[in-house]
Image (tube, rainbow, N blue to C red):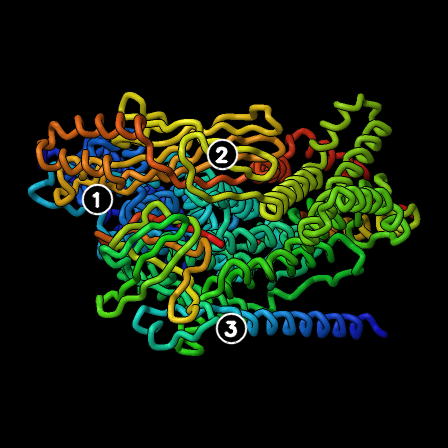
Amino acid sequence: MAALAVIIIFVLIGLIVLVVGAPLRRAAAERGGSSEGSEAPLRRAELEAAREAKYREIRDAEMDFRTGKLSEADHLALDAELRAEALEILNALEALDAEPPAGD
Amino acid sequence: MAGFGFICLLLALAVCAYGIAASIYGVRTRRWEYADSGRRAMYALAAVLTIAGLVLELAFISNDFAFNTVADTSSRTTPALYRVAAVWSSQEGSLLLWAWLLSLWSSLALFLTRRRLREVAAYATAILLGLGGFFVGLMVFYANPFSTTTPAPPEGVGLDPLLRFPTMMIHPPMLYSGYTLCMIPLAFGFGALLARRLQADWIGAIRRFAFAAWLFLGIGILLGARWSYAELGWGGYWGWDAVENASLMPWLTATAFLHSLMIQEKRGMLKVWNVSLVLATGTLAIMGTFLVRSGVLNSIHAFGGSTLGVPFVCLIGVLIAASIYLVVSRREMLRSENRLDSLLSRESMFLANNLVLVGLCFVIFWGTYFPLISEAVTGQESSVGPPWFDRYTVPLALVLVLLSGIGPVIAWRRATLANARRNFLAPVAVALLALAALAAAGLAHKPLALAMFCLGAFVLAVVAQEFVRGTRVRRAMAGESVPRALASLVQRNRRRYGGYIVHVGIAVLFIGVAASSSFQHASELQLSPGQSTKVGPYTVRYVRPTASITPKYDRAHTGSTVAFGAEVDVSKNGRHVTTLSPSEGYYASGEVSQGTVGSLIGGQPVSHVSIDGGVTRDIWGAVEPNIETGRLKKIVDAGNRTLSSDEAIVAIGLLAKEYIKKPPPAQFHFIVSPLVMWIWIGGLIVFLGGLVAVWPAPSTVRARAAARIRARSPRDLVRA
Amino acid sequence: MSPARKRTVRLVLALSAAVVLASALIYTSFSAANPALSPTQLLRQAQPGRSYQLTGTVEPGSVHRMGGVLDFSVQDRAGTRVVPLAYTGSVPDPFREGREVIVTVQKQGSRFVGERDSLITKCPSKYKTAPPSEKQNL
């Protein structure tokens, strides 16, 4: 019984080392691959999140207007404001796309 | 077997240590393979703890009394189902459950975020492994679930009969899931601060986990309240006990966070507030875990032993100090991008709601920890009772319900005052109508309950109005039939309408609480068979005594030796309403000093409450039979003198016969509570609404909506 | 008033309101609290009319039930001093001799009376880890 337990323990340790060490072995094999160091992907993620949030705001404002919480005048003003902000974000995203990919 | 389990714990500790080192090294040197390795260490931790848990479960199921925890909390007479649950009824087992759940949820969270938030996730991995390692360390050094005694005792003590109920089986896993899920936003919050990555997307990524924490904590709390009401002998569902409060506090801050999160996503505001809420929720969850097992406060959950108190206090101290330091040192990055446009906006309503929720949390915190505070300040330990809690929480709860009715009517960003005023007309009218009707019905002598009823009516009217208007809009836009319009309305605006459903649930829950606490009728008295009493509008009559000997007739399936009870007839105006059958179960104690017969029934008795639940009211009955009287006592004594332990069960049969033939008067407790059922129903509505709000919109709908907006060229986005 | 000024005013008002409410809360907690005392301390300090939280164990042999009133005595952990009291209200299932209890009492004349439904019984701590006990409530 004790022998079986010891064997299982060693198998367990072996499996853990295998699974946990897999990324390290993979990285050693493809030495020289690009690492994620540039800021661009982070900025892109942030802008995309902001864009989704802005779209949501535009939809919410429209819903608010249609269910009678905003007067037409207020909604037009708010809608224009939101769309201008959305435009800024879209422009920033375009600018990011236009940039040459940042070097390592 | 036990040795194997303990080695698994040591393995777990090693895996945690490696994972922490690998994650931190990986994120500092930007060698992401190490961070990935650290994440896999979390998966390995989950696997190892699962194995350890299985070993322990096996020991319980097979009645291996060599294991100390099995001998302490289980027995051959404990029903199989409860033997499985007994694993987490002890200090050691519950630590294992906590660590295991933490590793599971963390593995899920890290798996879901493995492609984005690399820096933040790496730090989060280290922190979560650190917490896991803390709990594993507690088991290895202080409270080992795999400790054994040789030779193994022949029989265990048995699971405390108070815990032998299905609700009590699910309550700890639910609650611990809630607590451990609070650790994930905490870890990601710390991670974001450490990595200085505080932009918009990290907080959206942890929304799902914050919601899951909120959901499980809420279910755990509700289950605890239901257990208290339906199984304990006092007929109440909330007593402001320290441990109840400890689980409520992180739930309140999590609710606040789910609201203010939306403001940060929309307007980039309240960053300091949100990060503080996240850290506070996690810290409160650790404090809750600590409270239950340290015995530091007088509470029903006296999980004794202050041996665990010191490590926990250290952990809490580290969490608080680290939180303050990180928030202060990163305050530049946490500056708001925008300001509140207008006080009349949904954003301000959310802010007000946050303030009330945090205020509630502070009140409860103060009252709960007051014995420690008073001892530190005055040298004398004092405690505040439920009346003090009620005095401050009830007004705050009223304000909360009011806000939940006002919020939906106010537009985002900048509402139009005239429109808002107009939209309030109908709901306010409904509330006033309710006020008049209830006052006329004679309820004016309980102003607080009356206020809650009217506010509840107000909220229900507001939400109904919202659904009606929304459906109308949908029909105008797409020409759908009413049911289809309603369905697609909710589907396309899940957050909004899911949130409205949650508010309905809260209103219903509070109406139930107000009704059942303010308009309760209770009666406690001694009755002999044939006697009756009046409880509110009902006449309650003790018809005849009952006695049942297990296992054949054990209706409750809890393994009691014998249960004595009563058949009670409930009628109203002469018409029979229902029959209650409360009883008291007597369990074996295993104490030789009580005698062969005495030890069969000398264990802790447990009241089996009988409830007739109804939509308008619950009728609740409990009985405490008296088995210490003359003839019954004589039978037990005679049996102790003349019968061996194998024959002792015969005396129990005689005891039961005697009890039925000549029953002594028994102590009865009856309660008639209006609208109690609505508390549980309200809770369910809250959770359903939450699920609706958080369910991801079908990707087709989202993509279509986004494409529509994107399809217009950027120029078109700026209309004249 | 400029928007910035308005915001500052709002902030100051909100903070002041919070401080006032918090102070009211803190003040009432100290005055509404019941000191937790052991039997020895209770016998020494108790004043008539004030409520106290008595903690200790139920003295063996002292439990008598008469009609709706439960008489029992609470003794120190050391077993030195004993406080007899008369209690009415619901009695938790785990209540028995030797168990740890918490009960809110008032001194009336020369006797101690337990407040209705205030009896809490803790389960026995045979081992480091004690199962939860039942609770009663006002």
Q: Which mark is residue B72?
A: 1
Give the answer, above or below, for where B302 lies relative to B463. Answer: below
Q: Which mark is residue B532?
A: 2
Compared across the picture, whether B544 is left or right of B12 comes to right
Taking the spot 67% from the left edge, 29% from the top edge, the residue there is B700
At label 2, which amino acid type do we have?
Ser
**Coordinates of residue B222 in the picture (x, y in percent):** 51, 42
Front residue of this view, candidates B652 and B363: B652
Front residue of this view, candidates C120 and A47: C120
Give the answer, above or below, for where B650 lies relative to C51. Answer: above
At label 3, which amino acid type do we have?
Phe
**Coordinates of residue B262 in the picture (x, y in percent):** 66, 50
Compared across the picture, whether B439 is left or right of B521 comes to right
Disc 2 packing (10 Å; few <14; some 14–19; many ≥20): some
Front residue of this view, candidates B708 and B283: B283
Mark 1 vs mark 3, foreground winner is: 3
At label 1, which amino acid type do we have?
Asp
Q: Secondary structure at mark 2?
A: strand
Which chain is mark 2 on? Answer: B
Quarter of the image where the N terminus of chain B is located: top left
Same subunit: marks 1 and 3:
no
Q: Which residue is mark 3?
A: C30
